Image (cartoon, rainbow, N blue to C red):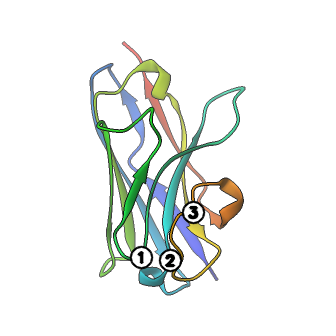
Amino acid sequence: QVQLVESGGGLVQPGGSLKLSCAASGFTFGRYTMGWFRQAPGKEREFVARITWAYIKAYADSVKGRFTVSRDNAKNTVYLEVNSLTPEDTAVYYCAKDRVLDRFGAVRASDYDYWGQGTQVTVSS
């Protein structure tokens, strides 16, 4: 069965960095777009970044220039490097698998069918 397991979250000071990982199994990883979303307390889940099967990347405006998404198909893992963090980046970060094979452009939560359990990122001094 499909499994997505995030790791790498934690407590970091403003301006700090983390590298989040999402290990995937149970599907042909290299054929699917993988996305990152986040959800802060009291807010809706929002798109952060995605990387297609063809390594095309997209970012939310709020993280552009600070976050970098990447993937290693040999390791069935997608990464999110988060830099220049601010308290507004505090959230649970989720990775997700596109529900459609070989698709470009998936940025809505409804475009994704499997989700990890999330990893907490807290930015505080």
**Disc 1 from disc 3: Cα separation:** 11 Å
Verify CB contact (< 8 Å) between mark 2 and mark 1: yes
For image coordinates 44% across by 36% down, the residue present is 61
Does 124 appear above or below 41?
above
Q: Position of residue 87 (x, y in %)?
A: 45, 19
Q: Which residue is situated farthest in the top direction here? A: 125
Verify CB contact (< 8 Å) between mark 1 and mark 3: no
Give the SS element for disc 3. loop
Q: Position of residue 34 (x, y in %)?
A: 49, 66
What label sits on residue 32 in the rendered view?
Answer: 2
**Disc 2 from disc 3: Cα separation:** 10 Å
What label sits on residue 106 in the rendered view?
Answer: 3
- Give the camera-side residue of 123 and 30: 30
For label 2, count other residues whose C-alpha is less than 10 Å away and answer few (under 14), some (14-19) or many (20+): many
What label sits on residue 53 in the rendered view?
Answer: 1
For image coordinates 61% across by 31% down, the residue present is 40
Considering only order in the chain, which callout, 1 or 2, is on the residue closer to the N terminus?
2
Q: Position of residue 23 (x, y in %)?
A: 44, 68
Give the SS element for disc 2. loop
Q: Which residue is situated farthest in the bottom direction here? A: 28
Q: Position of residue 12 (x, y in %)?
A: 34, 27
For label 3, count other residues whose C-alpha is less than 10 Å away and answer few (under 14), some (14-19) or many (20+): many
Amino acid beneath label 1: Trp
Give the SS element for disc 1. loop
For label 1, count other residues whose C-alpha is less than 10 Å away and answer few (under 14), some (14-19) or many (20+): some
Q: Quadrant of the image for the N terminus?
A: bottom right
- Quadrant in the picture for residue 73: bottom left
**Disc 2 from disc 1: Cα separation:** 5 Å
Verify CB contact (< 8 Å) between mark 2 and mark 3: no
Amino acid beneath label 2: Tyr
